[in-house]
Amino acid sequence: MPEMEEGEDIEQPLTAIAEAFEELSKWRKKEVHHIRLDTFCEAASLVSVLFRCLGLAFKFAELEYMAKLQGLVEASKTCPTLEDILVLDVASDTVKTSGSCSRNLRRVRQGLDLVRAIFEQLLSSDDTSLKEVASTAYGQVCAPYHTWAVRTAVYAGMYTLPSREQLLMKLNETEQSAEKKMKRKEANEVVGSSTGGKRQGRCRHDIVRF
């Protein structure tokens, strides 16, 4: 997989994301330990479009997400599957080391969780503002891991978020179509990460819900 760059605009990014993660879910049903890392990275890269649609408030999250994802892209040249990078880090005792593949995978999962939480909460009510749900989602998913300076900048940037109507317009979706795509079952259960220390030489897998 080539180095990741700013992708071209996708006419309907939610459709592309749902389809990509549905494809990953087929691998999960077949054999959880052999999901290809490059295929996972390709699917996860599509989510960057959603970060960009959220604007300046989540620019830091987007940059961090793409940087960690690029690390996984590089790892895919020598580690074909998700299992391979976890086994490698467990063997070298680098699961919790900054910059390790396991840490990168955890941060990518965190980015997926953040976007999922924002859209789930936004579409769960007709009168909830994007600023409200984004603030809540960020506070739950990312804020505990960010410094005070980053948290302050993100919360200040919440005032620059588009309205829910503007966001849906950017995505070329309606409330109904967006909700349908975000709730497609196959796209909600995909093995994506994560690491969990070592026990008898095994890696623990969690499920990325998106």
Image (cartoon, helix red, strand yellow):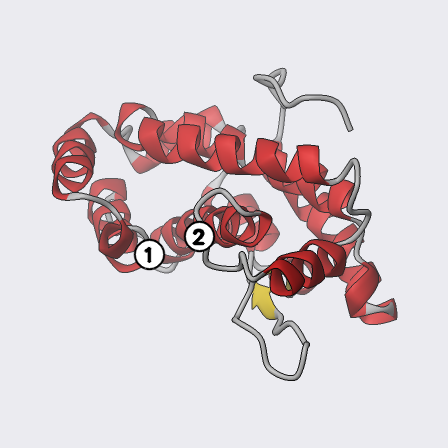
Q: Report which quarter residue 166 is drawn in.
A: top left
Residue drawn 42% across and 28% down? 63
In this picture, is 204 found above or below 174? below
> x%, y% of residue 56?
29, 23
Q: Residue at x 16, y 32 (%)?
A: 153
User: Contact, CB < 8 Å: mark 2 with mark 1?
Assistant: yes
Q: Amino acid at mark 1?
A: Val
User: Which residue is labeled 2 in the image?
Assistant: 110
The dot on residue 141 is: 1
Q: Residue at x 33, y 37 (%)?
A: 164
Q: Amino acid at mark 2?
A: Gln
Q: Is residue 16 visible?
A: no
Q: Is residue 135 at least partly visible in the picture? A: yes
Q: Secondary structure at mark 1?
A: helix
Query: Where is the N terminus found, in terms of image quarters?
Result: top right
- Nearer to us in this view, 171 or 158: 158
User: In terms of secondary structure, where does tag 2 sit?
Assistant: helix
Q: Position of residue 83 (x, y in %)?
A: 74, 61
- Residue 50 in the image: above or below residue 200: above
Question: Closest to the observer: 210 or 175?
Answer: 210
Residue located 57% across and 37% down the image: 69
161 or 198, nearer to the observer? 198
Q: Going by the picture, which residue comes out furthest to the right?
A: 30
Query: For the C terminus, which image quadrant?
Result: bottom right
